[in-house]
Image (cartoon, helix red, strand yellow):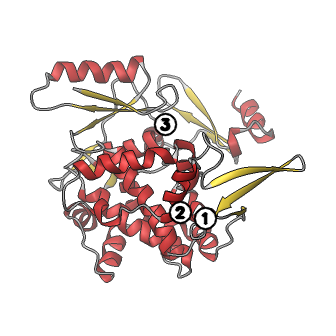
Amino acid sequence: MITHFFNPPRYMRLLEIVASDKTRTDAVEAMTQFGDVKLGKGVIHAKDTPGFIANRIGTYWFQLGLVGAMEHGLTVDEADAIGSRPFGIPKSGFFGTLDLVGLDLMPHVAASMLERLPDDDPYRAIHSEPPVVKMMLEKGWIGRKGPGGFYRLKKENGKRQKESIDLNSGEYAPSQKAKLDSLKASKAGGLRGLVEHDDKGGKFAWYLAAHALPYAASLVPEIADTVVDVDAGMKDGYGWKQGPFELIDAMGADWLAEKLTSDSIPIPPMLALAAEKGGFYRVENGVRQFLTVDGTYQDVPCPDGVLRLSDVKLNTKPVLKNGSASVWNIGDGVLCFEFTSKMNSLDPDIMGLYKKND
C-alpha cells in the first residue's frame, strides 16, 4: 500500500492511498480511517499509475498553461489571470505557482512522467521546454527560492517593484494587470462566457478547457474508480474550488461535448456518457449523486461521523439569512452559523444576524 502525502503535509490536506488486489482490505480501511480521523486529511483512493490522481492531471494542466500562453501570445500576467480565478483556481495561476514550487523541479517531474506514461498519453504531445525556461534554469532563476522566476521583486530607491518575465525575450518588465475583455465576460457569464469569447484570453481559456477537461474524463477508471476521487484530488491537492467534472457540469456536459465535436476534438466515453445522462452529478431526493462508469448514479460517499453543510443545504433552507451570514438547522437541536461575508470578516450584518439569532 502506498500513502502519498502532498507536500508540505502540515498544510496540504490531500492524502492519496494506493492499494492493489493483493492489499488487505482491512489494512486499507485502517489507513483510511487513520488519515481521516487522526490526521484530518482528505483521503482519496488512487490506482498505481504515473502521478496517481492529482499530479497526473496537475502536471498536464501546468504544461498546458506554459505552452498555451506562448502559443496564444499572452503575457505571464494575462495567462495567470485567465487560468486562475475564472476556473476557480488559486490566483497564483500557472507561473506564480511554478515560482512557488521551483522551476528546478520541472525537468525532474517531466522526466518521470515521460518515462512512465503510456505512449499515447496527450502529455507527450504537448510537452516541451521552451527556450525561456531553459535560459532561466541555466541562470538559476528558479522562482522564490532563487533571485526570481517568472516573477521577481526588484528593489529600487527603497521601493519594491513586481516584475514579470517576457516569455519570448526573457527580459523583465514591470508587471501589468491583465486587461482583457474575456475576463469581463467571465464575470457575467462564468467559465462558459470566458471560453466563448473571441479575444486571445478566451481562446487561451478554451484551449485549456478543451484539453484538460476531456483529459481528466479519459482517465476514469484508469487512475481512479470514481469521478468523486478525481474532483476531491484536485480540490484538496491543488486548491481548486471545483474538480474537473464539477467544472464540466458548470459549463454543461452536453454543451461541452457539442463544442468539442465542432472543433473535431475526440470525446472520451465518460464525457459522452455524462452528456447523454445530463451531467456527472445530480441531486436525487435531496441526496447528491455521481455518475459511475457503468452509467448509473450512486450517492456521493461521506465518511462515518461527517456532516457536510453542503448536504444540509440540499434539503433545507436557512432559518435566518442576510448578505453576510446564514443560520442552518443541522439537526439534533444544533444551529450552524455560517459566515458568507467577504474574507469571512465580521461586519455589522453578521453581528445583526447573530443578535437576531439570540
Q: Nearer the viewer, residue 347 or 242?
A: 242
Look at discs 3 and 2 and give the one toward the viewer: 2
Q: Are marks 2 and 1 in contact (CB under 8 Å)?
A: yes
Label 1 sits on residue: 170
Q: Nearer the viewer, mark 1 or mark 3?
A: 1
Q: Amino acid at mark 2?
A: Val
Residue neighbourhood size for the residue with mark 3, other residues' Cα within 10 Å, grouped as few (<14), some (14–19), many (≥20)? few
The earlier-in-sequence mark between 3 and 2 is 2
Quarter of the image for residue 54 reads top left
Compared with residue 128, is residue 110 higher up or lower down, i.e. above or below?
above
- Name the image quarter holding the C terminus: top right
In the rendered structure, which disc, 1 or 3, sits on the residue that comes first in sequence?
1
Residue 198 as seen in the image, left or right of residue 322: left
Q: Amino acid at mark 1?
A: Gly
Q: Does dot 1 land on a helix, a strand or a loop?
A: loop
Mark number displayed over residue 309: 3
Name which residue type carries label 3: Leu
| Residue 255 tag number | none
Looking at the image, residue 14 lies above or below residue 271: above
Residue at 39% from the left image edge and 19% from the top image edge: 37
Q: Residue 129, can we see it?
A: yes
State the SS at label 3: helix
At which x and y percent is residue 154? 76, 51
Q: Residues within 10 Å of mark 2 (few under 14, many from 20)?
A: some
Could you give the CA–CA distance between mark 1 and mark 3, rounded to whole angstroms? 48 Å
Q: Is residue 137 left or right of residue 184?
A: left
Q: Please, is residue 129 above or below residue 354 in the view?
A: below
User: Secondary structure under badge 2?
Assistant: helix
Image x and y of residue 60, in percent: 37, 56
Which residue lies under the disc numbered 2?
A: 132
